[in-house]
Image (cartoon, helix red, strand yellow):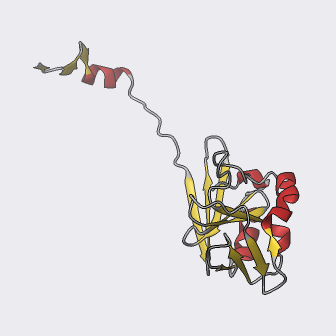
Amino acid sequence: MRFASGLFVAGLCLSTAAAAFPFFPKHPRIARHRTEISDWRLDVSTNPFSGNVVCRLRERHGEAVYQQGAIGFRFRASWDVENAIYRVDGGAPRTWRNDLPELVHLGTPIDTGGIDNPTQGIVWIPLSRLEGANAIVIQPRPDRAQRTFHFAGFRGLYEDAVARGCTPDSRFVR
């Protein structure tokens, strides 16, 4: 029912409600900043209300992501990559399981899946193993071909992330 004083909804006149509460403060929007360098992208979100900073540093197509001192290289989520082997810049092959103690120490989220496939197809490599690297080649399973990932732009974006407040590493999310 419509009256001259405004629209009634469930016994409340909306124009009267607006008059009773003339000021509805707008909350400041979350500031978002994106930077891309070569193969990598950095997204930084800053909440002006809480001051929280959240960062995402990942390969442009989402095939690799940085979190908690390591880079996770994504393969099919259904794949069990427990026996993955990698080579950094053509070096000697290394089983990623040998890095588990360091990954656990860093707090890297290596077990986000179920008990039958805890990694959900992500091979985590500590950043310390990738210092100065140009590329990494990973064979995710013995029955699958290897795949190459490049690091062009990663180091510059990581330094930019630190300068934008993405420390400690817990601010980085997938």
Q: Is residue 80 above or below residue 111?
A: below
Q: Is the residue 169 above or below the residue 133 in the image?
A: above
What's the residue at 62%, 81% (across, down)? 38
- Residue sitting nearer the eye, 167 or 129: 129
Q: How many marks are shown on the rendered structure?
A: 0
What is the quadrant of residue 75 in the picture?
Answer: bottom right
Q: Residue furthest top?
A: 11
Residue at screen point 79% across, 61% down: 69
Residue 27 placement, left or right of 63: left
* Residue 147 position in % (x across, y down): 63, 79
The residue drawn where x is 66% and y is 54% is 173
Quadrant housing the N terminus: top left
What percent of the width, then of the height, locates residue 133?
79, 81
Left or right position of 80 against 86: left
Left or right position of 78 against 142: left
Q: Give 31 or 88, whichever is nearer the viewer.
A: 88
**Where residue 46 sits in the image (x, y, percent)?**
62, 52
Residue 126 seen in this snapshot: no
In this rendering, the answer to whether 164 lies above or below 136 is above
